[in-house]
Amino acid sequence: ETQPLTSKKDVSDCNEGEDCKENGLLVRNPKSALRLMEDGNRVHPSQGDKGEAAQISNGYSGVQSSVPCNGMGEVEDAQCTAPAATTTTTTTTSTTCGAEGQQQLMELQERETWSKKIDFLLSVIGYAVDLGNVWRFPYICYQNGGGAFLIPYTIMAIFGGIPLFYMELALGQYHRNGCISIWRKICPIFKGIGFAICIIDLYVASYYNTIMAWAFYYLISSFTSELPWTSCTNAWNTGNCTNYFSKDNVSWASHSISPAEEFYTRQVLQVHRSNGLEDLGGISWQLTLCLLLIFTIVYFSIWKGVKTSGKVVWVTATFPYVILFILLVRGATLPGAWRGVLYYLKPDWQKLLATEVWVDAAAQIFFSLGPGFGVLLAYASYNKFHNNCYQDALVTSTVNCLTSFVSGFVIFTVLGYMAEMRNEDVSEVAKDTGPSLLFITYAEAIANMPASTFFAIIFFLMLLTLGLDSTFAGLEGVITGVLDEFPHTWSKRRELFVLGLTIICFLGSLATLTFGGAYVVKLFEEYATGPAVLTVVFLEAVAVAWFYGISQFCSEVKEMLGFAPGWYWRVCWVAISPIFLLFVTCTFLSNPPELRLFDYNYPYWTTVVGYCIGTSSVICIPIYMVYRLIITPGTLKERVLKSITPETATEIPFGDIRMNAV
């Protein structure tokens, strides 16, 4: 006898101990199934209820698409009753649930997963290991005590960075949603965090890809027998250009400028044609074409989803390590390399007493691992439910930190070589920070090595690949967030949405392509992302640990992995990590950086503009909180309680059955 799963059958017809199909439910014990349906609408079950839920997870019973229908965690009988149209032969039911239930069902039925586990790992590593690992960590390390800096860096990683990294991976994998819609299942009043993350990601895309356009310009310029930044005879050079690598006996004076610096400032950036942020000048058509090609590569790498980007990262995530190894070996054989390594690692223990060193360590590990950009949530949401995200968090974060450390040797062996050639101290050579360290100092050193063209090509290719997979990740955070929030509108139009997003990012980058674009990049890098992301992750940690509940979160991790996080992780999530974030945020806000680039000192009003840019994303959080309280019916107390209570339970895959996680 064959009967549809959705057919109506009286509960009393089910024999004791036999499987029964009733209104879309597959249950072993009908009474426990009824209890499950009732308990499925409770967000925080009692200890006894949790025991039954655990039994369900072991396969004794399951609910198929049993989703609350009014969006507020309550089932409305009038909406969710399945009216039966009975005939003499068959009995059918039709369910008319609300949009929330339909949306969640669509998410579960159509959500893709990574083709292989290694695709996910490479994508996360590629996202975490970016240009900052190459230029920011070595500079901060030698500036803050050399080898002694590794102590606060390691402490901040263990108690701050890695727990937040693990938390985001676990949240994304369990709830299988992007940065916006995931808050329906955690704490709806904090949904503004998701919108803030999307805005921050767009800000990053507007300046980060411009740095890659600079690298692309260098790459194209490297296909010559003699690199253009090796001589002072070019049209863009000035009278101060001094090539101390030439065969002539040239002395280095205070007003001397290297040919590499003039190529970077006068040919690539053309900052001499701008008067600062007050007058940015025209747009560089060369950089515009470079950026257009980069966004074209990005679009065709992510337009189909993680199954295509997961294949691209096999190149973009692994190639930099091959090049780093080649450059490390080459740098170690250069004369004077030992001077750079000594300067890099020589410990200055007195520095550990300075608060700034600990703040720099916390900021570096945080921005290096990258929680708060929605990327870890998005990538983990495409994992299989029982994937070991705990192991993934430890492996990827360890690889990221080691990459930063090794990159320091790659950079400082060359700086030691530069100091040897200039007959100066390493500290004088290492004055350049940020992109200038790569595009001036390192580029100049490469230009004066044997086989300079080869090393220049692979070096700037490495910079491009380091930046590309981070761009893939940042845009995927926005794409997944929006598609999960508006599945009926965009789920079948991903290619069109990604095209529109890349066009918006390209147009938003036009200000950074001007002759004064480098000044804009510096302003966005310091203000648009730093304090905003710190604030976002602080509120995210508080929402999960204190509103959603650390016990609830740990029980979900146990459901996925088979073991619950220990006391160390719980203490970090509840107290240490939020304090860590609050400490860094308050320090930054109390001491805003004084910006200077080349010979340009940023005026005071740029600080105000910078804070306005940073606030423009974070302001989404309180605006949504007010909006949420206004649209929620009931008294003020009822509105607050409903707004901090998850709207929908998370359905977890169990074979061909979908089970409500309660």
Image: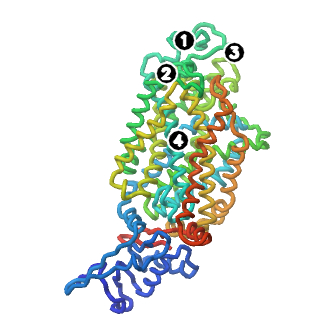
Q: Nearer the viewer, mark 2 or mark 3?
A: 3
Q: Amino acid at mark 1?
A: Cys
Which of the 4 quarters of the picture holds residue 146? top right
Image location (x, y in percent) of residue 520: 56, 32
**Which labelled disc corresponds to residue 452?**
2
Q: Distance between the Cα atoms at labels 2 and 3?
A: 27 Å
Q: Is residue 300 left or right of residue 445?
A: left
Q: Circles 2 and 4: CB distance less than 8 Å?
A: no
Q: What residue is pinned by disc 3?
A: 254
Q: Amino acid at mark 2?
A: Ser
Q: Amino acid at mark 3?
A: Ser
Q: Who comes first in sequence, dot 1 or dot 4? A: 4
Mark 4: secondary structure: helix
Q: Distance between the Cα atoms at labels 2 and 4?
A: 35 Å
Residue that appears at 38% across and 72% down: 97
Mark 1: secondary structure: loop
Q: Is residue 504 above or below residue 284?
A: below
Q: Amino acid at mark 4?
A: Tyr
Q: What residue is pinned by disc 4?
A: 203
Q: Nearer the viewer, mark 1 or mark 2?
A: 1
Image location (x, y in percent) of residue 435: 57, 31
Q: What residue is pinned by disc 1?
A: 232
Q: Distance between the Cα atoms at labels 1 and 4?
A: 37 Å
Q: Distance between the Cα atoms at labels 1 and 2?
A: 17 Å
Q: Is residue 479 above or below residue 653?
A: above
Residue that appears at 41% across and 74% down: 66
Image location (x, y in percent) of residue 167: 57, 58
* Disc 2 packing (10 Å; few <14; some 14–19; many ≥20): some
Q: Nearer the viewer, mark 1 or mark 4?
A: 4
Q: Nearer the viewer, residue 381 or 396?
A: 381
Q: Is residue 467 above or below residue 427?
A: below
